Amino acid sequence: MSPLPEPRPAPPRSASLPRARRRSRIAVIGAGPAGLTSAKQALAEGHDVVLYEKNADLGGIWDPASGGAYTGVRMQSSRMSFPFSDFPPRGVDDFPTLPQVHAYLRSYAEAFGVLPVCRFGHRVVRVAREADGWRVTARHEGGESTGVFDAVMVASGELWEPRLPEHMPGPAAPVRVWTAKSYRGPADFAGRRVLVVGGGVSGADIAAELSDTGARVDWSVRGRALFLPRDCAGVYNDALFSYAGRVALEEMPYRDYLAWLSGLLPEYMAMYRRTGLLPADGFHGAVHVNEKAIPRVYRGRITVRPAFERFAPDGTAVLADGSERSYDDVVLCLGYGMPDYGFIEGFRREDLYEHHFFRHDPTLAVINTPVDTEGFGTACPYFETIAAWALAVFAGRATLPDERTKAAWCERHLGRPGERRHLDCWLETIRIGLAAGTLPDPRTSFASYWRLVSGTVAPSRLRPEGPALPRPATYDGLLDLDHLRHRVLASLPLADRDGLLAAGEIGRADYEAALLVPDGRELPPWLPYRQRRGSWLPTAVPG
């Protein structure tokens, strides 16, 4: 692993980039969590902002009226980790409900003056680069309107177009077919034969919910995933380990990790093993959060079936073992397709440097989750950090590499759209926050940096000034974080370590321990993690 590169000097100002600290006109597309924080931060920097939202209200999939999420959905992230860094939630459950998240997002927009810049019922149908800027055209009840902007932040979301099998049942087939997006709740499923297809979080949630209604539920899974409860022996699932702890945990043998879980959750893990669904290997950080599905499989209220292959013409489900089964309802939880960026002229997803910046003109930024990933972790602080990075690039506070480097990155990372990878949103928040300059710089403020990454994942600790006090995560004591700290120090140039020692940011013992870290064992401060099964792919720092 290479050491953290020296900061790049600011490049010559391009006509396509707004001047640093200049008041710019910025269009934000989409009023979900990503769009709201983009608009909020742009307003805070003094820019003129217009936020376009196709629906009548904000929230994206968390708007109950949008049809983006089923009624019974509950956040996988706890009230500790889900919110934006500067707006703690009030009056929400430990794991908030759909109405609670929507109310939280509305309160956020009201508190920071975002609502007055929202244009609800405005669907953006065209974004085009012209000589005077980006021309944005929106369609609404009164017709069409256009505006010209210095920069565009696309936060349209990626969970809108569900994947479907190649062949669907004909209209005369005696089966109702749903998707995770069209499913609204368990009403009218009592006594029906239901197949839920998909071994991810939505599949587990819906199968468990339907099994409570008297439906006869089969659950078709292609692979085994690690499901853990929201509450792990009285501790929030996301409070078990710190950012650094999540990296250190990956170096624990998976068998030892399962043994530790068995001690923490003996009854749950015993049930899990008896279902045959416990994965024999896996990512330590790739945890699906659901406490109901595994116990219901164990008690026979959900029957696990082989992977779904296709529908027969009469609507019968054909499974991977060759068996065919008839159902009254099939709920497809197969994930979501690529977002439709067809409204952006001359745009290709393959040209998104670091998944967020249009490499030909980085005043167009996409604040969505990368489409080739399966994300784990909380969304609000993750989107908050991406938006901060985009605004820093717009203003010249952060720089991107030259065109050749960006093109090479896109060719290397976006050439396999069908191969999904694990995305740890907590660790990505650290990585991108370092690039954006919103987190303490370990080269000059190592003590604040280490207090952040070795503490709980509460977003309030992500504020630019850094956390004032240590706040260890509940089970970091299982791990050797001292050694991990020395590996991070060893990745810094020796001159930076000398400066940290002289400034009192590190002690002599840490300084000397870093000198003893073997070559190849250094760990960059952005905390790279394994993204594909069986491989460890350290990611270069953005920009």
Image (cartoon, rainbow, N blue to C red):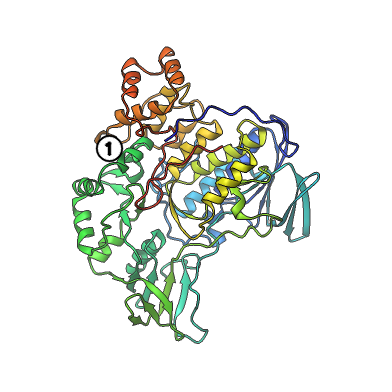
Q: Position of residue 160 (x, y in %)?
A: 55, 61
Q: Which of 514 and 108 is in front in this view?
A: 514
Image quarter (top left, top right, bottom left or bottom right) of the N terminus: top left
Classify residue 296 by image quadrant. Answer: bottom left
- Pointer 1 residue: 475
Image quarter (top left, top right, bottom left or bottom right) of the C terminus: top right
Q: Which of 309 and 405 is in front in this view?
A: 405
Q: Residue furthest top?
A: 502
Residue 504 drawn above or below residue 343: above
Classify residue 223 by image quadrant. Answer: bottom left
Q: Which of 513 and 461 is in front in this view?
A: 513
Amino acid marked by disc 1: Tyr
**Residue at the image point whose x is 49% and y is 41% from the top:** 381
Crowding around mark 1 (Cα neighbors within 10 Å: few <14, some 14 to 19, many 20+) is: few
| Residue 52 shown left or right of residue 263 in the figure | right
Residue 5 drawn above or below residue 381: above
Q: Position of residue 181 (x, y in %)?
A: 50, 65
Whether residue 356 can be seen here: no
Q: Where is residue 352 in the image (x, y as percent from the top left)?
A: 60, 49
| Residue 534 shown left or right of residue 134 in the figure | left
